[in-house]
Amino acid sequence: MQGGFEPGLGGVALPRAVVAGDRADASGLAQIVLGLRPTQFSLSAPALAAVRGLAALGDRETLERIVDALAAAPDETRVVTGTALAAVAALEDRHDVAVSELLTVEQTLRELDRHYDAACVALDRAASLERLGDERGAGEARDRANAVLVPLGCRYPY
């Protein structure tokens, strides 16, 4: 714990702030996450949710800082850095890059049996596929995601 902040809570609190539309709270939480050592959050499932929350806010600067912070971390962080790189690409309207990064992340998550996280990433991939005009691919990605999320009754997939 750093300064009374449990690193895993960033993956819960930051998306909650996004869903609530509280940009100030989300930004403050992102700054706390950036103050952590990469090993404190880079390999955790909540780190993926925090990155996706920042992407939903369009916070490109913080996403780029997270990618930089994780550059020196172990290879296993590719899930988090790949998601952050895809988010930055999507914010820059480079959806082809986002789709490619997110496919790699989704496949890796499925291999790690992290099916909920893979479903969340599939939704992000579907959004980028739609922006590229690939409705069929977007539908397939959404179907994969919904196969996991619908039975869970998930309304806010982070």
Image (cartoon, helix red, strand yellow):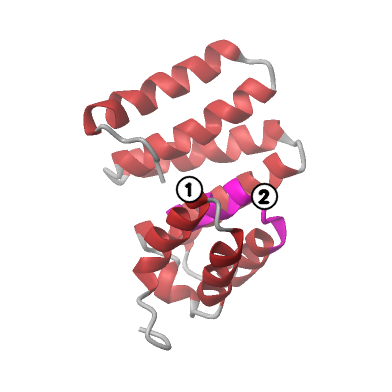
Secondary structure of the residue carrying numbered label 2: loop
Residue lying at the far bottom of the rendered structure: 3
Q: Residues within 10 Å of mark 2 (few under 14, many from 20)?
A: some
Q: Residues within 10 Å of mark 1 (few under 14, many from 20)?
A: some
At a point 49% along the width and 79% down the height, the residue shown is 36
Q: Is residue 119 magenta?
A: no
In the image, 31 versus 106, the foreground residue is: 31
Q: Amino acid at mark 2?
A: Gly
Which picture quadrant has residue 40? bottom left
Q: Where is residue 16 shown, x and y percent of the image? A: 43, 55
Q: Nearer the viewer, mark 1 or mark 2?
A: 1
113 left or right, relative to 103: left
Residue under label 1 = 19
Q: Which residues are magenta?
A: 48-61
Q: Is residue 125 above or below residue 36?
A: above
Q: Earlier in the sequence, mark 1 or mark 2?
A: 1
The residue indicated by pointer 2 is 58
Distance between the alpha carbons at the discs numbered 1 and 2: 13 Å
